[in-house]
Amino acid sequence: MGLIFTWLLALAGLAVGWFNPIIGLLIYFAFALLRPPFLWHWYPQLQGPRFSMMIGASTLVGWALKNFGDWRRLDGIWLPIAGLIIYLLAGLFAWKVNAVDPVRAGIAYDIQLKICIMVIVAATLLHEEKHIKAFAWVIFICLGYIAYEFNLEWVQTGWSRLHTRGFGGIDNNGAAMIMVMGVPLAFFLGLNYKQWWIRGLCFGIAVLLMHVVLFSFSRGGQLGLGVVGFMLLVVALLHLPRKGLTLSLTALFLAMTVYLAGDQVRERFFTIFVDEQERDASAASRFDTWAGGIRCMVENPLGVGPRNFNRVSHEYGLAVNKSVHNLFIQTGADYGVAGMLGLAMFYFGTAIKCFNMSRTRAAAVLGWPRYYGHMVTISIGGFLVCSMFIGMESVEVGYIIGALGLCTVSYVRHHAAAVTPRLDLLPELEQVPGYQLDAA
């Protein structure tokens, strides 16, 4: 059934993308998240068709035929988009001028170029409420299915594929980071709906996502999950209604997390906080790679080329082909200081804009955007915590969830004037803590 589903979805994306790029874009993101070559054993990893690339190309043709979307939608989200452009320009310069290994740099840069372009496509295409909500559900369903597959494998075999092999070309730390980012998505989607079965589905998926983080044995993922849980509690109590439900769910999730985490998980997590003499080799090596990456960035402020720090890592006291276990230090070494700042502009700018949007009266009246704003803010927060220990700029989930947030911010900004008359009918909103009196 999985094989039939994959082919039908791919053919639909290819057939529809060029005249309805919105559908093509959502199907493209589904493939980017599911990564069939790594999820299902029957998919030939090397010889299989590159569905994601073909659907992306079809979508870009449709985007071009639609006059490249509506660029006026970027006026309220220009800072994160400008950050992406700066990041790409810095990477292009580092590749063409400074790259130690131009071939490796070109391959890495092509991946990032594709990812960033699709973010811009989403920001210029997804203008309607139904499209943004469909986008959120595509992300949720795909991450939820991945979590289900890994939990099923764990229950049936007691073996953690993530811990030994990773997923989608990334190691267990990157896979855990993806699951961490999915938890706020599932939590706030559940709070946003009143139907008991939708809530049950969302909260159940949240538990599966958390469990995957635990048996991935990723300390960075576990730390990110803890920070996400704390932020969920604080934001929900301060800015959302139904505080009793929030406290009950928090207590339930905490109890289940403690129950599901075995002795091995707890012992591995607490090695984060031991002193330098007791720290194991894996944890200690992260600090060594940080120091090496910073030295490289200082000596090469324009970068050594995308993913080229690995080619010079031995010059900074590290093993040959060693990566920096920190997203921004790795980016600074590869793309230069400008590239690192551009990537930071995208992630931090998106998080700030989403949080500010979620606290406006326009978002309160519209309802769903405040949940989306909080979910994206906390997802990016969890991502940033995990990224302190992971240097994988090509993990696409962060960009995809960021794009969801930017589309929501743009929607609220362009509909604020339309909902302003409705604000006068709801004076009690002025008493809701945490909401600004200004329109979005």
Image: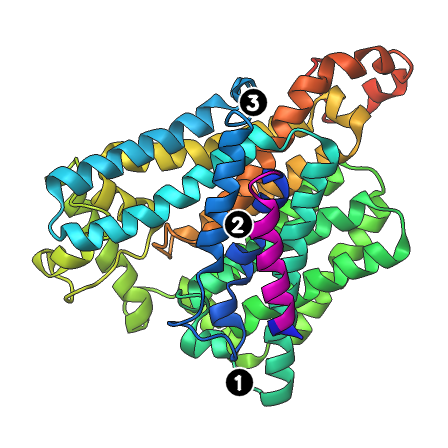
Q: Nearer the viewer, residue 20 or 316?
A: 20
Q: Residue type at mark 2? A: Gly
**Is residue 434 shown to the viewer in this render?**
yes
| Lower sequence index among marks 1 and 3 | 3
Closer to the chain start, of discs 1 and 2, is 1
Callout 3 secondary element? loop
Q: Is residue 102 above or below residue 39?
A: above
Q: Is residue 7 magenta?
A: yes
Element type at mark 2: helix
The residue lying at 28 percent from left, 72 percent from top is 281
Q: Is residue 16 left or right of residue 197?
A: left
The residue labelled by disc 3 is 70
Q: Which secondary structure lies at badge 1?
A: loop
Query: Which stretch did the figure color magenta?
Result: 4-19
Kindly identify which residue carries mark 2. 382
Q: Earlier in the sequence, mark 3 or mark 2?
A: 3
Return the x and y of residue 265 as percentages of the image width and height: 52, 75
Q: Nearer the viewer, mark 3 or mark 2?
A: 3
* Distance Cα–Cα, label 3 vs label 2: 31 Å
The reply to whether callout 1 and callout 3 are in contact (CB within 8 Å) is no
